[in-house]
């Protein structure tokens, strides 16, 4: 009997340590990207994807700046700081993508993170949040959606 109680206490304390500083989120959440003037954007939480991605209608290099238009009716936004990386797409095929670093707000959490830029027009959600963004900060409950609302 005492052994079971000790085991339960151990498991409870282990759970508390794992959950410390982590937020439970659903398989889809609404996020804000304030530096991109985008609010209440639905994001797919994808533990199968390593990187995070943002849909862009247009991506152009103008002089030494990277300029993007996320939606046709959104303004052009230009970046001085960006990089190019080789990233596997949804089909597992590698492609070169531009990557920016921006502020992502999900629930009460504000996190500066990298987003690769790609045309996700054929995808259901304009933003995909991958493991690199999620690691150490979130636990995903795949049975739920919109837990940060």
Image (cartoon, helix red, strand yellow):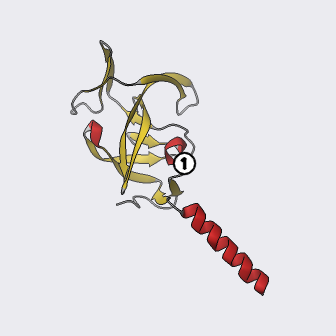
Q: Eyeballing the image, is 55 above or below 67?
A: below
Residue 13, image x, y percentages: 63, 71
Q: In this view, does 81 lie to the left or right of 27?
A: left
The residue that disc 1 covers is 135
Q: In which quarter of the image is the N terminus?
A: bottom right
Comparing 12 with 76, the one in front is 12
Q: In this view, does 62 lie to the left or right of 47?
A: left
Residue 144, image x, y percentages: 47, 61
Q: Eyeballing the image, is 73 above or below 28?
A: above
Q: In which quarter of the image is residue 102?
A: top left
The residue depicted at 33 percent of the width and 23 percent of the height is 80
Whether residue 123 can be seen here: no
The residue depicted at 77 percent of the width and 86 percent of the height is 2
Q: In this view, does 141 lie to the left or right of 35?
A: right
The residue lying furthest to the top in this view is 63
The residue depicted at 53 percent of the width and 27 percent of the height is 87
Name the secondary structure under disc 1. loop
Comparing 28 with 7, the one in front is 7
Q: Eyeballing the image, is 125 above or below 3?
A: above
How many marks overall? 1
Q: Eyeballing the image, is 107 above or below 128?
A: below
Residue 71, image x, y percentages: 27, 33
Q: Quadrant of the C terminus?
A: bottom left
Instruction: Tell me the crowding category of disc 1: few under 14, some 14 to 19, or many 20 or more residues within 10 angstroms, Cα based.
Output: few
């Amino acid at each position: 009997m005492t052994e079971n109680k000790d085991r339960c206490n151990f498991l409870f304390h282990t759970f508390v340590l794992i959950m410390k500083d982590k937020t439970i989120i659903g398989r889809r959440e609404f996020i804000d990207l304030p530096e991109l003037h985008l609010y209440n954007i639905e994001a797919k939480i994808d533990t199968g994807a390593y990187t995070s991605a943002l849909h862009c209608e247009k991506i152009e290099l103008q002089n030494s700046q990277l300029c993007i238009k996320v939606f046709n009716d959104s303004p052009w936004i230009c970046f001085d700081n960006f990089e190019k990386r080789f990233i596997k797409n949804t089909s597992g095929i590698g492609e070169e993508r531009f990557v920016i670093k921006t502020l992502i707000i999900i629930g009460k959490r504000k996190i500066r993170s990298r987003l690769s830029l790609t045309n996700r027009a054929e995808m259901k959600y304009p933003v995909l949040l991958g493991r690199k963004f999620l690691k150490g900060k979130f636990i995903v409950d795949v049975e739920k959606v919109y837990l940060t609302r």
